[in-house]
Image (cartoon, rainbow, N blue to C red):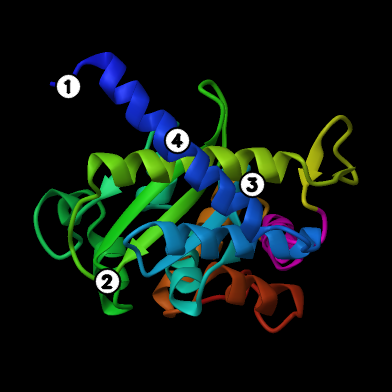
Amino acid sequence: MRPKDERERERSRESPGAADAVAEGVRGVGPGEIPGRLCDVAVDLLPVSGASVSLYSDGLPVQLGASNAQAAYVTEIQATLGDGPCQSAAESGAPVLARDLTAGQDVQRWPVFAQQATAAGVRAVYSMPLGSETVCVGTLDLYREAPGDLSDQELRTARTVAGMMTVALMALPHVEEAGRPGDKRWLSGLATDHDQVYQATGMIMAQLHIGTNEALARLRAHAFAHGRTALDTARDVVTHQLRFDEDP
């Protein structure tokens, strides 16, 4: 093992480069563009094909931005299933590295997610928690089309980007969320689509006379059974194209 002072010198050399790249990536852009720009920076700095950033509210990942359609889709798969590396990282507050979704322990840990992710062309996922040592507020999710690990240096870069992303997101405007005194929703307007998931969950609760967790589970289960995302299914509920009290 290398001496501690050598590791510290390496970190001090690397972090400013990553920090400078993050700062340059968001220079001059509006608040609504920042999450997507930060994902682009992560892809530029790391050997990954895509990245997404999500915040967590009531156990549901709210996707704020993604570098491409593939990353956005695989993130939505995890939201629909309520399972996957990003969910595990959010729950543990520690990085979760799914190095090979085609075989081995990662497939055993997330069998359904692994099957759907590989079908979408993703074979490795690295999820970095956002927040502090005591509170995780979301994840930076990195996707790669080939199995493999991150080197120690790459993992440090991923941690640095996640740290800078947390700072950048926390600096954006906050607004009070209606009906929840003292609670603040981050990045008002960026997660508008996901408001439909909460609205649909409330409608399912009323239709079936069940609690929030069961209503969300029913929404996810229906989406999975019909090969759709939770967000698409929620839109059908909100627009009255789907009722759960009529669901066979």
Decide which of 8, 155 is in the foreground and name it: 8
The residue that label 3 is drawn on is: 212
The residue that label 1 is drawn on is: 2
Q: Which residues are magenta?
A: 188-207
Q: Amino acid at mark 1?
A: Arg
Mark 3: give few (<14), some (14-19) or many (20+) Cα within 10 Å: some
Mark 2: give few (<14), some (14-19) or many (20+) Cα within 10 Å: some
Q: Secondary structure at mark 4?
A: helix
Image: 238 above or below 162: below
Q: Amino acid at mark 4?
A: Glu
Q: Which mark is residue 145?
A: 2
Mark 4: give few (<14), some (14-19) or many (20+) Cα within 10 Å: some
Whole-percent x, y for residue 140 in the image:
49, 50
Q: Is residue 213 visible from the viewing direction of this image? A: yes
Query: For the residues marked 4 and 2, what is the alpha-carbon distance in whole angstroms?
Result: 25 Å
Mark 1: give few (<14), some (14-19) or many (20+) Cα within 10 Å: few
Whole-percent x, y for residue 112 in the image:
27, 63
Which residue is at a point 32% across and 57% down the rendered structure image?
125
Dot placed on the residue nearer the N-terminal end, 1 or 3: 1
